Image (cartoon, rainbow, N blue to C red):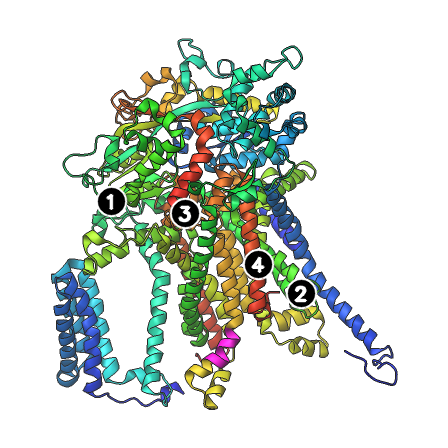
């Protein structure tokens, strides 16, 4: 593409300079490529990326405190908690005005749920207080400090006020701190008490187990893909049915099947006991732990490894192997130096599929994983559907996403995505 | 070429130790079940080696030998462990008589290249045994739950009656439930409607985009790729809640402004949501196939005057079809097996099969879900075998030699 | 793309064509046998009376999250939702459920007692309309526990007399109370103790003594399956599930009613419905929670009706023909020693204790 000619620019057939002509061709090519990509890109951007980003944005969003207590927050910000004294009457009065409005709009309990994540007990304090505050008048009933203290002892608790003060910002890093087993306190970020630390451990466990599952899938999938790609079509198509059948079968059914297989009164244990390989009283514990999760998920994800490998291996010419052998390569050398490198795109595609799917799974670990075989996604699901702590769920989801993207990037650097042509 | 390999009888010094080893394995199982593993190994090895000697040197009638082994071993099994053991015994009998003759007559070399060393022959069969084990791993859980769908009780449990093969342990009531229960029927139809349409959308858009991405000069390819495969990366539960908001608004707009029927809008929402989830699979598999695609072919086609559309359908498409089909399979199964997103995005009228199964597992144990699975497996076996049959027929019609 | 769109439109239209109804309402419930009992007792008579088509949506397990999402998106498609009382309280706090005035919105008892008295203490929170009383209690395999079957809750913690696995729910609620109760804490002090760090540690330590013998369940159908398999010798679950295992499936299982934890399940009406839909939902609720209907539901499932006036009307099981009263958790013989789920306490402490419990589980 260079015009190193010394006698003026090189010309294309139609007389335009070659460089410009090539540039135009390149532009046309780019436009055509983009036109092919555009419909899908737009579809995914609009219907997926934007909604997900706005969901993940909840991990830093915290406007509920300011919105519900618009008058209290600025005044409370000036309160110096280190003096050891409760906030002044001014703060209580502002709180009374805010609460009267909030109770009327039924927003106070929502705020209470938010603050209860940070300080246990606020939920019932707000709910109980709300019933009385409803009847107050912002002018006639002043002053409020005494009234609040009579209402619930929590209003005289320094920690409650500190909590409100700490968590009154429009945005918060609190959820992210929670997601890595830390907490946002008035004194700054601190580690969670040890008996509440679980999430970092779960992250690490999720990563390690996903890697193990991916490794198991490569080990089991490669021979299968190879034999499918190298047998005559007649036989390989029949064997393909054996791969496709589990794949067709519902995930829920397969997970239940593994439960039937693995439990202590299950098929595997019964057969082993029947054969006398295992004593009746020492049946193997192979479910409700990490082993159960790994076996069941390897089974479920194996087709996701085999099928891409197979479609890549099918394009590898068997003649290359024969050529290598005819030139004196041993079986192993021929495989390792000629066949294997060509099959790497398949391994890459399969591994990425399996790893990423594994990392986000939660139904199977929930059913066969017991307590030690659950993944971080199980916690995300819990916080979405049970505890309603969507901020924390979003923070966990964001971290998970970032981890996957980093791994994707590292994979690109080390193995080279070009080998998979994924990007 | 393969059939040309000459075969010859093998000496007993090879046959006897090998079959003895195989017999020892059977002996180990039978022996441990009856008290002593070591005795089992010795008796098993001796018995099978003895059989081999008698069959090959004295009896010399393969058919008769086969039946003797099957009947004899079945009878032995029955004595030791009743009907189940008798069945296993018969199978073992068939296997061992076949194995003895297979080794003795040297049939194992028949299909192999003549110049292979014994080590290579061993590896050839060893590799097949490994593959067989993996296939067994793949298929056993499914085979195991199928009988449970005929359970006369409402649990996923092999009852003593079932294990004794008594008629009252079995029933078809779960199948009856599936065919007569409206909820199951409706969810089955919904799945059959939603999954194919979602697949068509993701395959058509996905294949185009994959081809676009595989061109040599695409600005920002990495970023685009990351965006396109993101539906797979984001944990499903987050996708589900996130997409809910988007589709709720789209739904409001379609119902309010465009005046579509509520039900119709519900289907559109679920189908589009599932289509998005299927896209990464299509992209990944199709791009992987395109790596091996020789670009000079399309150039050759355009050189010879084909327009891009013709080139695509006549040259490129047939070559990348395996990738497209496997991507389509993934996309289909993603939708057909998806439960989290539809729980959020769908409403009662769009209840799909997995949703119904999920409720079934959680709220009321019912082997109906196993009956459904068995029916689906049956249908897919029938479909796949028909496809294979058609393929062979067209092969024959085109006068190709069967491979 | 236009092709697929047309294709999509035509196919979906053909499907949707048959489903146009004049008036319909979507009622959300748990699915399975429970929805069936509601259909028989409430939906079918109501449809017959009013001509309104009722669509069942089995989404109660996700109801809280989904209602919140619907509310934010401004498109609530549900009319009446069946949830447990704790979730109703949460929804009420979040402003997602409508407040209910029992005396004007619910039918009085046949003798004229206003609904607020007839339901009594069961009206927890401002939005919740109680329907049934269920209990979380234990069932055990009669053939696997030896000659002296367990009779006390603390037998669950006695792995010497009753070796084998037991199943417990994978959450702190109920388990923490039982653990304290069996660790020498008096029943009336349980929640005071549980409010302290030491008390929580004490409960976890007690649970720790059987941790290796526990299979943790998360779906109500798990324990019945585990019992039927003989995978566990005893396990906690909802009493209706155990009834079905014992009476309908004839499994060798019996109930351990000691220290059963009462909980409530009932209706809420989502906040922000249009007036027309709200009217319809209230009309349905008025119909479905009157004395006779609540008693009717007990014909199909062994949960106790929430009204005092319904109790005498509980009859026989619709298919089996056995008396249902002795199978109700509220029956005096069964209710000798009971707990009532402490809603206020758990609303405050759930997040905190649950975090500790889950961390403890993962250790």
Residue at x 57% of width, y 58% of height: A406
Q: In this figure, which residue is indicated by the disc labeled 3?
A: A366
> Is B112 situated above or below A79?
below
Q: CA distance from mark 1 to mark 2?
A: 57 Å
A111 or A322, nearer to the observer: A111
What residue would you read off at disc 2? Answer: B212
- Circle 3: is it few (<14), some (14-19), or many (20+) Cα within 10 Å? many
From the image, state whether disc 3 or disc 4 is nearer to you: 4
- Residue A315 within the magenta-colored segment of the rendering: no
Image quadrant assignment for residue C308: top left
Magenta stretch, main secondary structure, is: helix
Please provide the residue range marked out in magenta.
Answer: A336-343
Q: Which residue is mark 1?
A: C230
Tell me the number on the disc at residue A315: none
> Considering the numbered disc 1 on the image, is that residue within a helix, a strand or a loop?
loop
Chain hosting mark 3: A
Residue shown at 54% from the left, 62% from the top: B327
Which residue in the protein does label 4 denote?
A406
- Do the CB atoms of the residues marked 1 and 2 lie less than 8 Å apart? no
Q: Is residue A315 above or below residue B1?
A: above
Q: Are marks 4 and 1 in contact (CB under 8 Å)?
A: no
Q: Residues within 10 Å of mark 2 (few under 14, many from 20)?
A: many
Secondary element under disc 2, as helix, strand or loop, is helix
Q: Is residue A115 visible?
A: yes
The residue nearer to you, when weighing B193 against A390, is: A390
Distance Cα–Cα, label 2 vs label 4: 25 Å
Residue A349 in the image, given as x and y percentages of width and height: 53, 65
Quarter placement of the C terminus of chain B: bottom left
Q: Is disc 2 in the same subunit as disc 3?
A: no
Q: Secondary structure at mark 4?
A: helix
Q: CA distance from mark 3 to mark 4?
A: 26 Å
């Amino acid at each position: 593409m260079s015009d190193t000619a010394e006698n003026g620019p090189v010309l294309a057939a139609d007389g335009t300079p070659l460089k410009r002509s090539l540039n135009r061709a390149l532009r046309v090519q780019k436009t055509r490529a983009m036109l092919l990509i555009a419909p899908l890109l737009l579809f995914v951007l609009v219907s997926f990326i934007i909604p997900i980003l706005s969901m993940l944005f909840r991990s830093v969003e915290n406007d509920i405190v300011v919105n519900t207590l618009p008058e209290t927050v600025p005044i409370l910000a000036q309160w110096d908690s280190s003096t050891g004294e409760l906030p002044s009457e001014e703060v209580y009065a502002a709180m009374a005005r805010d609460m009267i409005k909030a109770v009327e709009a039924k927003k106070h309990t929502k705020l209470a749920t938010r603050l209860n994540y940070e300080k246990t007990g606020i939920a019932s304090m707000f709910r109980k207080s709300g019933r009385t505050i409803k009847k107050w008048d912002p002018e006639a009933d002043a002053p409020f400090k005494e009234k609040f203290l009579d209402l619930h002892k929590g209003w005289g608790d320094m920690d409650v006020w500190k909590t409100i003060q700490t968590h009154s910002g429009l945005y918060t890093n609190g959820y992210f701190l929670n997601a890595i087993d830390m907490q946002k306190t008035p004194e700054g970020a601190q580690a969670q008490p040890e008996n509440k630390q679980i999430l970092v451990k779960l992250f690490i466990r999720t990563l390690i187990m996903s890697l193990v599952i991916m490794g198991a899938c490569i080990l089991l999938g490669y021979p299968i893909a190879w034999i499918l790609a190298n047998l005559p079509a007649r036989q390989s198509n029949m064997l393909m049915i054996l791969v496709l059948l589990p794949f067709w079968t519902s995930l829920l059914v397969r997970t239940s099947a593994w439960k039937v297989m693995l439990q202590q009164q299950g098929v595997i244990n019964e057969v082993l006991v029947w054969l006398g390989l295992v004593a009746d009283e020492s049946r193997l514990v192979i479910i409700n732990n990490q082993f159960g999760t790994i076996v069941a998920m390897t089974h479920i994800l194996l087709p996701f490894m085999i099928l891409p490998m197979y479609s890549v291996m099918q394009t590898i010419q068997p003649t290359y192997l024969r050529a290598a052998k005819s030139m004196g390569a041993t079986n192993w050398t021929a495989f390792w130096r000629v066949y294997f490198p060509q099959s790497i795109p398949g391994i890459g595609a399969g591994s990425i599929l399996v790893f990423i799917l594994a990392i986000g799974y939660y139904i199977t670990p929930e059913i066969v994983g017991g307590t030690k075989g659950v993944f971080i996604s199980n916690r995300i699901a819990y916080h979405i559907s049970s505890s309603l702590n969507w901020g924390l769920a979003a923070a966990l989801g964001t971290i998970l996403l970032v981890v996957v993207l980093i791994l994707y990037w590292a994979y690109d650097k080390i193995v080279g995505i070009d080998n998979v042509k994924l990007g | 070429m393969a059939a040309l390999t000459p075969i010859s009888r093998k000496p007993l010094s090879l046959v006897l130790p090998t079959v003895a080893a195989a017999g020892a394995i059977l002996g180990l199982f039978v022996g441990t079940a009856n008290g002593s593993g070591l005795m089992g190994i010795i008796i098993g090895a001796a018995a099978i080696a003895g059989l081999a000697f008698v069959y090959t040197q004295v009896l010399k009638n393969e058919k008769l030998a086969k039946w003797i082994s099957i009947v004899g071993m079945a009878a032995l099994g029955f004595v030791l462990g009743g009907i189940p053991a008798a069945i296993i015994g018969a199978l073992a009998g068939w296997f061992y008589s076949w194995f003895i003759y297979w080794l003795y007559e040297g049939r194992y070399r028949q299909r192999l290249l003549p110049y292979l060393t014994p080590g290579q022959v061993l590896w050839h069969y060893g590799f097949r045994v490994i593959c067989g084990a993996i296939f067994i791993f793949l298929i056993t859980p499914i085979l195991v739950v199928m009988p449970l769908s005929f359970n006369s009780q409402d649990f996923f449990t092999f009852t003593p009656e079932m294990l004794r093969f008594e008629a009252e342990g079995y029933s078809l009531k779960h199948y009856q439930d599936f065919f007569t229960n409206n909820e199951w029927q409706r969810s089955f139809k919904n799945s059959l409607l939603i999954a194919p349409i979602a697949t068509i959308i993701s395959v058509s858009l996905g294949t185009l985009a994959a081809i676009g991405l595989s061109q040599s000069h695409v600005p920002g390819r990495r970023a685009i790729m990351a965006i396109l495969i993101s539906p797979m990366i984001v944990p499903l539960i987050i996708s589900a809640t996130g997409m809910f908001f988007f589709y709720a608004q789209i739904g409001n707009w379609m119902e309010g402004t465009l005046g579509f029927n509520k039900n119709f809008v519900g289907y559109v929402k679920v189908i589009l949501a599932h289509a998005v989830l299927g896209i990464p699979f299509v992209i990944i598999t199709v791009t992987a196939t395109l790596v091996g695609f020789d670009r000079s072919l399309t150039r050759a086609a355009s050189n010879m005057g084909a327009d891009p559309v013709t080139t695509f359908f006549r040259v490129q498409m047939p070559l990348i079809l395996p990738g497209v089909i496997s991507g389509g399979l993934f996309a289909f199964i993603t939708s057909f097996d998806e439960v989290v997103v539809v729980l959020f995005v769908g409403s009662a009228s769009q209840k799909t099969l997995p949703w119904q199964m999920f409720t079934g597992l959680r709220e009321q144990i019912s082997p109906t879900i196993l009956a459904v699975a068995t029916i689906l497996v049956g249908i897919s076996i029938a479909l796949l075998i028909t496809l294979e049959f058609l393929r062979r027929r067209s092969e024959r019609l085109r006068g190709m030699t069967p491979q | 793309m236009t092709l697929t769109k047309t294709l999509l439109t035509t196919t979906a239209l053909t499907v949707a064509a048959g489903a146009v109804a004049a008036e319909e309402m979507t009622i959300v419930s748990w699915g399975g046998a429970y929805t069936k009992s509601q259909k028989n007792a409430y939906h079918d008579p109501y449809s017959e009376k009013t001509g309104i088509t009722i669509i069942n949506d089995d989404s109660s397990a996700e109801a809280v999250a989904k209602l919140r999402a619907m509310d934010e998106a401004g498109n609530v498609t549900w009319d009446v939702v069946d949830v447990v009382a704790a979730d109703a309280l949460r929804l009420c706090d979040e402003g997602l459920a409508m407040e209910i005035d029992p005396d004007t919105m619910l039918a009085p008892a046949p003798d004229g007692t206003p609904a607020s008295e007839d339901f009594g203490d069961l009206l927890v929170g401002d939005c919740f309309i109680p329907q049934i009383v269920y209990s979380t209690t234990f069932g055990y395999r009669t053939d696997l526990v030896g000659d002296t079957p367990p009779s006390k809750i603390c037998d669950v913690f006695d792995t010497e007399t009753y070796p084998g696995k037991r199943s417990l729910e994978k959450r702190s609620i109920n388990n923490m109370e039982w653990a304290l109760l069996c660790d020498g804490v008096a029943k009336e002090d349980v929640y005071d103790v549980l409010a302290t760090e030491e008390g929580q540690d004490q409960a976890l330590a007690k649970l720790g003594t059987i941790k290796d013998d526990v299979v943790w369940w998360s779906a109500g159908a798990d324990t019945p399956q585990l019992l039927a398999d003989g995978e566990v010798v005893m396990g906690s679950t909802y009493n209706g599930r155990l009834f079905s295992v014992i009476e309908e499936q004839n499994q060798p299982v019996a109930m351990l009613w000691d220290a059963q934890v009462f909980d409530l399940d009932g209706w809420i009406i989502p906040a922000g419905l249009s007036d027309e839909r709200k009217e319809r939902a209230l009309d349905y609720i008025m119909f479905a929670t009157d004395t006779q209907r609540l008693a009717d539901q007990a014909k199909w499932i062994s949960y106790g009706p929430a009204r005092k006036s319904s109790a005498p009307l509980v009859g026989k099981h619709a298919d089996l023909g056995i008396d249902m009263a002795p199978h109700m958790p509220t029956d005096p013989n069964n209710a000798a020693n009971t707990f009532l789920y402490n809603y206020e306490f758990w609303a405050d402490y759930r997040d905190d204790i649950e975090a500790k419990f889950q961390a403890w589980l993962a250790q």
